[in-house]
Image (cartoon, grey):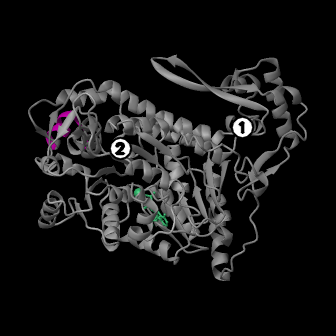
Amino acid sequence: MPDLQEILRTRFGFDAFRAHQQEACAAVADGHDCLLVMPTGAGKSLCYQLPGVARGGSVLVISPLISLMEDQCLKLIEQGFKAARVHSGRPREESRQACFDWRDGELDFLFIAPERLRVPGFVEWLTRRRPGLIAVDEAHCISQWGHDFRPDYRLLGDRLGALRGVEGASGEARPHSPVIALTATATPTVQNDIVRQLGLHEARKLTHGFRRTNLGVEVMELKPSQRGDAVCKLLTDGANLPAIVYVPSRKECEALAARIAEFTPCMAYHAGLSAGNRDDAQAAFLSGDVSVIVATIAFGMGIDKHNVRTVIHTGLPASVEGYYQEIGRAGRDGKPSRAVLMWSWADRRLHDWFLERDYPPVDAMRALFGALSSRATDFESLGAELNLDASTLGGRVDKLSALGAARVDADGFITRGEHGWVEDYQRQVDHKREQTDRMVNFAQGNTCRMAALVAHFGDREDEGRPCGKCDVCAPQRCVLKSFRAPVEKELTVLRMIVGSLLERDNQSTGKMYRDNFDEKQLTRRDFEELLGALEQNGLVYTTQDEFEKDGRTITFRRASLTPAGQETGTELEGAIMLPGVKPAKKSATKKRPASRKRAARGKVDR
Ligand code: ADP
Ligand code: MG
């Protein structure tokens, strides 16, 4: 086998492999199919580029984002490789030339967008040359359980066989070209799905590098109304800048950005802004002209800023995968950084509401399916027939077509697809709900935050050791959370909860509340907070349970005492600390006096 180190130095200009790159490169150069799961920035591209060079021949790269494709292609050309790309943003003439160059074996790398696989004759053209290697970048897009499913990626499963060819007699037939699938975001479920969808052959699965040693994760239950103040407090400390603040809605995005802009340069970023405004905000943040960006999840794909000190979430993200991607934008320079998550049970309900909006009941989907037939219809008449507005209808048609139950042609005409989609649809909805459940479990968790994240991605080589930096491992290092002893009134309630559990373990939390308290004396929310504190202090644990009512599954929680809780009993004084927000630190930044006055006024106005 060619010397991989040598290729690394001479062809790519790097002195050494980064962690885990060598293992991946060796496996792929050796001809094995491989699924590589490593976080963004870990250097996954090299793991197909280098083995591609080592194996000789041309590498076919499938990539879903035109911007990423352009970046990587141009970088390779700069490094002296022959690389070309074919996607909808390229002049037709150049795409044609790229195809000829591919056929003639002139290219080291050809990048294609997945929707090309739809174009009649394209795959046949590609098969005129066997690739030395096929790379599927952002491979989670093929899985409907992934957080960024692209229906076009599904075509890959079908076409890959023809592209890679087979060798040997049919008995021991083995694919001619190895395939490497790469992603930064795949849980073990999604990983298995990718392997299955792509038909990877005895795939080596490499999942590495999810532990971030310079990132302290801090989670705090906070009422929505308290979060704005908490964010401002954090950001008045210059040590926490630059910062990205993720908010759940556009409205909050604008409001919070305006508020922060009163004391430090800040801009908003969300999908409702014009492309020009978004580019300006991103550029200002990258250059350092602006120290805070307040954004919806639309922000962050492909941004490369190394000195972000803090990533704040003012609401519960929809999935742990998405959350990990977002906090991964802190501390790329390796220096200590924080991720601060604010959440409460109200966030959970908001997600349920989103889910119901985005995934209508099966009956509504059946009505749409029923309105389709083998005769093509257009969006307008379909919308009129079903009495749906364009965006609602568009969303539903997308869902059906992803399930193969509808087909939309290039002119926007829709025909009916296959039956048998209902179960898949239901599973998708369940999966979405489960993702939120897992996020809630993470937020509620009582174990090391980093260890929990690493476990989520199934990094089996990580020993799961505590990070020593998060709010669970090192409460004293928290930037938002501080801890205090409960006051007498709180102690009374805490004793009542423990007393009730001593009498009867494993109680439904809702029933326990109703049996022991009334709304005027103690709100349900305050009750949940105190119960949460007992859990955080390791005295109580809760589990999810469910029952059926009117054909719907209702989930609820049960509380039990831990062994430590049994032992402590109602002797709670000194045994429990409650979380509270840290008082604002005297600002470390030098601020202009005028802006400080404005900031103070802003707070009073609210
Ligand atoms: P990923 O796809 O995992 O997000 P990339 O492949 O885009 O990451 O790589 C991120 C950056 O790391 C790129 O700028 C790349 O040039 C650089 N890089 C990759 N491998 C090495 C290496 N062995 N030594 C130095 N820099 C590297
Ligand atoms: Mg990449």
Residue pointed to by mark 1: 532
Where is residue 482? Give x, y as percent.
77, 53
* Quadrant including the N terminus: bottom left
Name which residue type carries label 2: Phe
Magenta span main SS: helix
Q: Which residues are magenta?
A: 380-389
Tell me which numbered mark, 2 or 1, is placed earlier along the sequence: 2
Whether residue 383 appears in magenta in the rendering, the answer is: yes
x and y, in percent, of residue 325 in the image: 50, 53
Mark 2 within 8 Å of ligand 2, using the beta carbon: no
Label 2 Cα neighbours within 10 Å, binned few <14 / some 14-19 / many ≥20: some
Is 410 left or right of 3, judged from the image as shown?
left
Q: Under tag 2, what secondary structure?
A: loop
- Nearest to the observer: residue 380 or residue 590: 590
Q: Crowdedness of circle 1 by 10 Å Cα count: few (<14), some, many (20+)?
A: many
Q: Please give the count of numbered marks on the rendered protein.
A: 2
> Residue, x 46% and y 17% (percent of image)?
550
Q: Is disc 1 placed on a helix, strand or loop?
A: helix
Q: Residue at x 33, y 60 (%)?
A: 53
Q: Is residue 149 left or right of residue 260?
A: left
Report which quarter residue 519 is drawn in: top right
- Name the kind of residue labelled 1 in the image: Gly
Residue 438's disc number: none
Which label lies toward us, 2 or 1? 2
For residue 291, above or below residue 407: below
Q: Quadrant of residue 309?
A: bottom right
Q: Percent position (x, y) of residue 416?
A: 17, 31
Q: CA distance from mark 2 to mark 1?
A: 35 Å
- Where residue 366 appears, x then y in whole percent? 26, 26
- Compared with 23, 11 (above or below) is below
Q: Identify whether 466 is placed above or below 385.
A: below
Q: Which residue is mark 2?
A: 149
